[in-house]
């Protein structure tokens, strides 16, 4: 379908006017970028019953309307040191309508945001728990409150710039899918980044990764153009799927909520010839961060390691020559990081093969917990060795209850020594509650 074709759009509009509640016709209309789509949108820009169409329309008329709203918000914010509740609500609603918008006016506003990114960060435009009162949606089309509620259920904790970059990543892919060679979205974002390289780095990296992972590595990683936080923002969407002749790497674009019912929408992009240099980098970077920091805290370590370990757990499923390298990483990171991803990694690495090895792992972790080098993670680690996952083909050793109980006892023995602080003695008492006391005595 040529979504720039006026005549095709007119035919669709005729059907849509006869069946205005038809979901498929509405979705198809929202893909058109032509004069006919612009004309119909202009007649309905202020209609609250069709705000879902305004949100999803790719027409330049819709894009210019939302760009104007965004400009007014930015003008208002310039007069304030921090956003108030109403401005936060307005910002969230306007960004919701920025999905797929790609008129020249919208890109000019994006450029303004890039220029003022540092100042915008200081305005406290965020929608985390307890930072925003949803009364800001009172009197607005119910779609916004409904959509915000679904975002809360998903656990989204957006800031203005993070939300905008999510929109950019999915919109860029959408533009390529619908318009092919006529798409200019990614090129516009890259042009903005050339002038303001510290603005939309996550979006820029994601767009390059979708096109060529080796070029993305050279530009962003080797070129030192991306921070760990921005990198994790994108690599959290990388996953591996089994196919007939092996495994393939994919990047899922951020999930957006679209349509009258606020349904989930995103794209999956195959990362062909995925550059394995990312694996080496992701295994080394958390150690560089840790070494450069003066913070000595288990919570800090867990947070540092998590995004890198999560990525490496996913890469482990490929089962290729990278597996042993990643398994080596998790044999260390379970002690140095101790996040949920590190626990998955050591369990799925295949390195813990016998009850004796599991007992040794629990005992070593217990000693680190007692010396405050690690959080109390044994409950959660235990789950990794008890569950099964039939969709993954990794040599995992799942242990029987009596083998887990033996590991309990080895950890408990450490906790119950005289030099353990009282708080850990109490934890030990809870931890061994269901463990056979005779078993504990037998190894004491």
Image: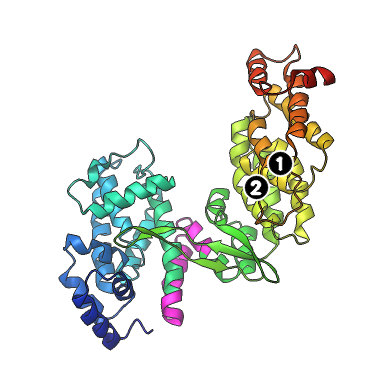
At horizontal 62% and vertical 41% (from top left) the residue drawn is 340
Q: Quadrant of the N terminus?
A: bottom left
Alpha carbon separation for disc pair 1 and 2: 8 Å
Does residue 295 appear in the picture of this structure?
no
Position in image of residue 149 (x %, y %): 33, 47
| Image quadrant where residue 386 sits | top right
Q: Does 370 appear above or below 133?
A: above
Q: Does 318 appear above or below 341?
A: below
**Is mark 1 in CB contact (under 8 Å) with mark 2?**
yes
Residue closest to the eye, 436 or 80: 436
Q: Main secondary structure of the magenta part?
A: helix
Position in image of residue 226 (x %, y %): 56, 55
Q: Quadrant of the C terminus?
A: top right
Label 1 sits on a secondary structure element that is helix
At horizontal 62% and vertical 58% (from top left) the residue drawn is 221
At horizontal 56% and vertical 53% (from top left) the residue drawn is 236
Residue closest to the eye, 219 or 133: 133
Circle 2 packing at 10 Å, graded few (<14), some (14-19), many (20+), is many
Query: Which mark identifies residue 224?
Result: none
Position in image of residue 217 (x %, y %): 63, 63
Left or right of 273, for residue 402: right
Name the residue furthest bottom. 7
Q: Which residue is mark 1?
A: 333
| Magenta-span inclusion, residue 432 | no
* Highlighted magenta segment, given as a residue range: 177-206
Query: Which mark identifies residue 309?
Result: 2
Label 2 sits on a secondary structure element that is helix
Q: Does 104 appear above or below 429?
A: below
Position in image of residue 316 (x %, y %): 70, 55
Residue closest to the eye, 70 or 199: 70
């Amino acid at each position: 379908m040529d979504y720039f074709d006026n005549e095709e759009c007119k035919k669709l509009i005729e059907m849509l006017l006869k069946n205005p509640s038809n979901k498929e016709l509405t979705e198809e209309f929202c893909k058109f970028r032509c004069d006919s789509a612009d004309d119909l949108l202009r007649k309905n820009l202020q209609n609250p019953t069709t705000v879902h169409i305004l949100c999803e329309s790719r027409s330049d008329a819709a894009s210019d309307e939302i760009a104007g709203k965004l400009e007014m918000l930015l003008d208002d914010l310039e007069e304030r040191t921090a956003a108030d509740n109403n401005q936060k609500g307005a910002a969230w609603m306007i960004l919701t309508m920025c999905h797929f918008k790609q008129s020249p006016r919208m890109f000019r506003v994006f450029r303004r945001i890039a220029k003022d990114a540092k100042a915008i960060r200081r305005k406290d435009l965020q929608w985390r728990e307890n930072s925003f009162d949803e009364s800001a949606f009172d009197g607005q089309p119910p779609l916004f409150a409904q959509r915000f509620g679904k975002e809360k259920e998903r656990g989204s904790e957006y800031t203005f710039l993070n939300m905008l970059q999510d929109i950019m990543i999915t919109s860029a892919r959408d533009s390529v899918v619908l318009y092919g060679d006529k798409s200019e979205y990614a090129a516009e974002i890259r042009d903005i980044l050339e002038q303001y390289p510290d603005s939309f780095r996550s979006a820029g990296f994601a767009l390059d990764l979708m096109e060529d992972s080796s070029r993305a590595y050279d530009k962003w990683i080797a070129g030192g153009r991306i921070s760990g936080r921005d990198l994790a923002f994108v690599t959290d969407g990388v996953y591996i799927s089994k196919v007939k002749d092996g495994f393939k790497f994919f990047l899922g674009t951020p999930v957006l909520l679209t349509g009258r019912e606020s349904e989930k929408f995103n794209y999956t992009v195959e990362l062909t010839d995925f550059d394995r240099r990312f694996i080496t980098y992701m295994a080394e970077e958390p150690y560089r961060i840790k070494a450069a920091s003066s913070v000595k805290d288990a919570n800090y370590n867990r947070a540092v390691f998590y995004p890198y370990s999560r990525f490496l757990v996913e890469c482990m499923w490929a089962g290729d020559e990278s597996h042993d390298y990643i398994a080596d990483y998790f044999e260390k990171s379970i002690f140095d990081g101790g996040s949920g991803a590190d626990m998955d990694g050591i369990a799925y690495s295949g390195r813990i093969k016998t009850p004796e090895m599991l007992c040794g792992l629990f005992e070593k972790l217990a000693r680190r917990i007692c010396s405050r080098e690690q959080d109390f993670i044994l409950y959660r680690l235990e789950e990794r060795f008890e569950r099964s996952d039939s969709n993954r083909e990794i040599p995992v050793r799942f242990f029987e209850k009596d083998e887990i109980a033996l590991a309990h006892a080895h950890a408990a023995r450490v906790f119950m020594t005289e030099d353990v602080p009282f708080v850990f003695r109490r934890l030990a008492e809870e931890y061994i509650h269901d463990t056979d006391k005779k078993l504990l005595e037998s190894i004491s």
